[in-house]
Image: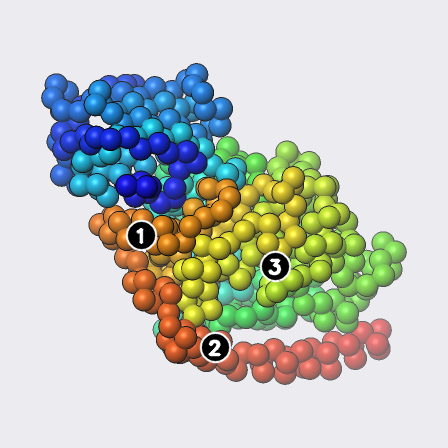
Amino acid sequence: MNRLNLVPYPKSVEIFDGTLDCKALRIAGDECFAVSDFVDKVKGMGAEISLADGVKIIYAVGDCEISDKEGYILRIGDGGIDIKALEQAGLSYAFCSLRQLLFNYAFKLPYCLIKDEPYLKHRGLLFDVGRYFYSKDDVLKIIDLCYLHRLNVMHWHLSEDQGWRIEIDKYPLLTQKGSARSHTNFGIKPHKGFYTKADVREIVAYANERNIQVIPEIDMPGHIQSALACYPHLGCFDRKLPVATHWGVKHDPLCAGKESVYEFVFDVLDEIIELFGENTKYVHLGGDEVFKRRWQICERCQAVIKKEGLENEEQLLGYFMRRVCKYITDKGYTPILWNGLDADIEVSDDAVWQFWGGEGENDNDAARSAKSEGRQIASDSEHTYLDFPYGKLSLRKAYSFNPLNKGVREEKLLGAEISLWTEYVPNFKTACARLLPRMCALSEALWLKGEKDYSDFERRLGYTVKYLNREGFKSRALKIANPSKVRGNLQNAWFNRRVLHWQGLHNLLDDAYVSRKFSKKSKTK
C-alpha cells in the first residue's frame, strides 16, 4: 500500500503495518458541529456509536504542531484514533477525512499518521444561480459538496441578465419581476425564483457551520438586464427591456452618467452588506464584459467623460468601478472584480482581481497581475469552467490545473475557484454531472501543492466516486469524464450547437436600432 484512498490527498502521510477495525466507535471530546455531523453520517454508513464500547476517538482543539487554522493531525493506531487541530475548521476537515476513510476502507483503517493543511487559503466554488434558479435545498446540497471537497468559499453569483435572485427591500420589483423570464435555453417553459432574506440567512449560517464563507456577487454595470427590465431609468435611454431569455452577453449596461444609478447601486450594496456582513468581508462586483456602445451615444455618459477628463468609454468603466469600490472599502469591505478592465486603468488598490483568463495566454491578465497591489484569485477558464463539456475540459486536464497558469503571481495569490456557470445547467442533477468527478480533481489541485500523479489520483478517485454517490452526488463515469476523441468531438459539437442561436443576431440588430434612434436624437440637441 503506497497511498491512502483519500481525495483531496493530505499534505503528509505515513502508513504503518496494521489495521484498526472501526465498525464500533466511541467518541471523547467537547460537543461541536464537526462531531455531530460525523456521527450522523457514519451511523448512516452502518457504524455503531457507543459511550462504552468500540474504538475510541479522542479529539482536541488548541495548541498543536500544525499552525494553520485549517490544518489537523489524524493518528490511527492500535490505541485508537487521535485528532488534534488548532481551530474548529481543522477539526472539521479531520472528521471529513476520517469519514471518507471509513467508507473507502469498509471500516478497517490502516495504521497511519496524517499531518495536513491546505496549499491555498481561498478555495472556492462559483455557483451561478442567475441563469437558472436553484432551490434553497439545492444550494444547501451544493454547500455539502463543497464541504466534502474541503472548499471554504461559495462565490454566489446572484444577479444576471436572465434573473435577479436576491430580495432587496428598497427595490421590490427586482424579485417580483426581475426573477422571472418568459422562457429558457431549453424551450418555451417560463422560469423564475429568488431567495428571501430569511433564505439567505439560513444558507449563510449552514455554510458557516461547515467553514464555508459565502461571498455574494452582484454583477455591474453589465450583466444586469434583469434589473433594467424592472427599472428602465437605470439604463442610458430608459428602454423597456425584458428579462433576458437566452445566454450570452447583453448590450445594455447601467448608465454611468446618471447619479440615480449610483444611488441604486449603493442602496443595493447597503442591503447586501447588512445581510452578508458578519459572514464575509468581501463583495464581488463583477465589472466584466461591459459593452460600451450605449455609452458612446449617451449624452450623460459623454458629459461625465468630459467633466472627469477621461479619454474614452473604457476609462468611464474605470470611473464607475472606482466609485463603487470606494463605497465598499469605506464601509470596511474588500471588493472583488473580474479581470477584464484594461490593466492601465486604476480602480482600487484594495481590490482583489479574479482572473478567468480566457483561451490561451492573455496579455492583459499578465499586465494586471504585475501592476495590481491587491490579492488575486485564479479561475482559469480552460481548467476550471465546469459548464464546459468533457470533450473540452476532461478530468485529466482539470487535474493539471495550476493556479499560476495565467500569469497570476504567487506572492499575491489569495486562492482559486472552480466555476459552475449555469447557462446549460438547469437543475441539480445536471450540476452534479458537470461537477463530478472534475470537482474532485480540482479540489486536490487547490489543497495540495506540487507535482501530482494522475494515475494514482484516478485509482483513489474510484473509491471517492462511490462515496460521493452514496452521499447523493451522482458522478459521471470515467469513460465520459475522459472521453475518446470521437466521443469528445460529439460532446463539443452538441455544446457548440446549443450556443448558436438567434440572440447574437438580435443583439446586432438591436445595436443598429439604438444607434439610429438615439444617436440622431443626441445630435439634434
Q: Hey, which residue is sitting farthest top in the picture?
A: 63
Vertical position of residue 88 compared to residue 166: above or below:
above
Vertical position of residue 272 compared to residue 18: above or below:
below
Q: Which mark is residue 459?
A: 1
Q: Which residue is mark 3?
A: 357
Residue drawn at the location 58% of the way across and 44% of the way down: 283
Mark 1 touching mark 3, by CB under 8 A? no
Amino acid type, residue under disc 2 in the picture: Asn
Amino acid type, residue under disc 3 in the picture: Gly
Q: Which residue is mark 2?
A: 496
Cα distance in 3D space between marks 1 and 3: 31 Å
Relative placement, left or right, of 358 versus 135 is: right
Residue drawn at the location 48% of the way across and 52% of the way down: 418
Residue drawn at the location 35% of the way across and 45% of the way down: 7
Amino acid type, residue under disc 1 in the picture: Arg
Q: Residues within 10 Å of mark 2 (few under 14, many from 20)?
A: few
Q: Where in the figure is residue 169, as x and y percent of width and height?
A: 51, 47
Mark 3 touching mark 2, by CB under 8 A? no
Q: Where in the figure is residue 376, as x and y percent of width and height?
A: 62, 45
Cα distance in 3D space between marks 3 and 2: 20 Å
Q: Earlier in the sequence, mark 3 or mark 2?
A: 3
Q: Quadrant of the N terminus?
A: top left
